[in-house]
Amino acid sequence: MMFDTGSIARFFGLIAALLAYFGVNVPEDVTEAFTSLVVAALAVYAAWKNNYISKKGHEQKKVLEEAGLKKGENE
């Protein structure tokens, strides 16, 4: 990744603080929709990264099974 997680969190914290300081009111439904979107995106990303879905993932699973580091489906 280009930025580390701490930098991204600090950036969004700064944006939130500036919005609060200048009194910008964000409607509650927009906040809830944005939060739901972020949670859904993170869930899809976590499911993608923690499973052997892609072609590269299938190759990694095969190498792990051949090395005896991962059990097969039937074991």
Image: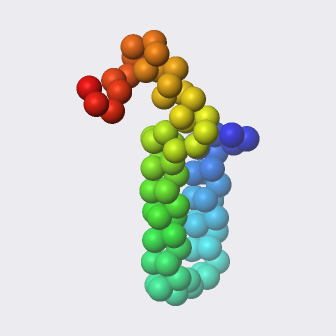
Q: Nearer the viewer, residue 41 or 14?
A: 41
Image quarter where the C terminus lies is top left
- For this orientation, the residue located farthest to the left is 75
* Residue drawn at 54 percent across, 34 percent down: 58
Q: Nearer the viewer, residue 25 or 30?
A: 30
Q: Nearer the viewer, residue 20 or 8?
A: 8
Q: Is residue 15 above or below residue 58?
A: below
* Residue drawn at 58 percent across, 67 percent down: 16
* Residue drawn at 64 percent across, 45 percent down: 7
Q: Quadrant of residue 23?
A: bottom right
Give the x, y percent position of residue 17: 58, 65
Give the x, y percent position of residue 18: 64, 68
Q: Is residue 17 above or below residue 57?
A: below
Give the x, y percent position of residue 55: 61, 39
Q: Quadrant of residue 25?
A: bottom right
* Residue drawn at 33 percent across, 33 percent down: 73
- For this orientation, the residue located farthest to the right is 2
Q: How many marks?
A: 0
Image quarter where the N terminus lies is top right
Q: Is residue 14 above or below residue 26?
A: above
Give the x, y percent position of residue 20: 57, 74
